[in-house]
Amino acid sequence: MEQKNQFTLIDENGKQIVYDVLFTFDSDETNKSYIVYTDNSQDAEGNIQVYASIYYPGSETSKLDPIETDKEWKVIETILSTIQEEVKKQDQTVDEQ
């Protein structure tokens, strides 16, 4: 059985929530490292909720910081869009076979 890359955070109510890591990346544009993750919950439209934070690879602490600038969100949204397009292309290729 494949083990997923997961981590647990405690929310403001003290509840432990397990998140699945979707991917991490370093941005040359912002000189920061980002983690994109999900708790697999759905929004009102049925889309899986996805979150992103700044993280510090190689650090002894597992601190996540919020993304606060529009520039950083634009970088993350661009990468997410690229990944979604690749997944769609792969799905179309599989459907055509």
Image (tube, rainbow, N blue to C red):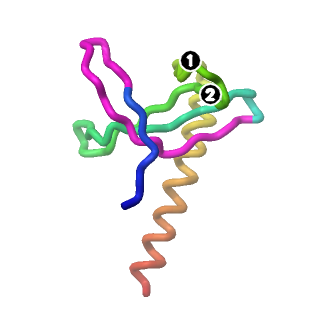
User: Which secondary structure, mark 2?
Assistant: helix
Q: Residue at x 67, y 30 (%)?
A: 58
Examine the rendered structure and indicate whether residue 51 appears above or below residue 67: below
Quick check: can you spot residue 71? no
Quick check: can you spot residue 32? yes
Q: Residues within 10 Å of mark 1 (few under 14, many from 20)?
A: few
Q: Main secondary structure of the magenta part?
A: strand
User: Which secondary structure, mark 1?
Assistant: loop
Q: Which residues are magenta?
A: 9-27
Q: Point out residue 97 in the picture as x, y percentages from the top left corner.
A: 43, 87
Q: Point out residue 45 in the picture as x, y percentages from the top left corner.
A: 25, 42
Examine the rendered structure and indicate whether residue 8 appears above or below residue 48: above
Q: Residue at x 32, y 44 (%)?
A: 48
| Frontmost residue, 41 versus 17 | 17
Label 2 belongs to which residue?
72
Label 1 belongs to which residue?
68
Mark 2 is on which residue type? Glu
Q: Point out residue 79 in the picture as x, y percentages from the top left corner.
A: 59, 45
Determine the image quadrant of residue 63: top right
Q: Using the image, tell me which numbered label, if any, was put on residue 38.
A: none
| Frontmost residue, 81 versus 15 | 15
Are the two marked residues, 2 and 1, in contact with CB atoms closer than 8 angstroms?
yes
Q: Residue at x 58, y 25 (%)?
A: 54
Is residue 29 highlighted in magenta? Answer: no
User: Which quadrant holds the N terminus?
Assistant: bottom left
Determine the image quadrant of residue 94: bottom left
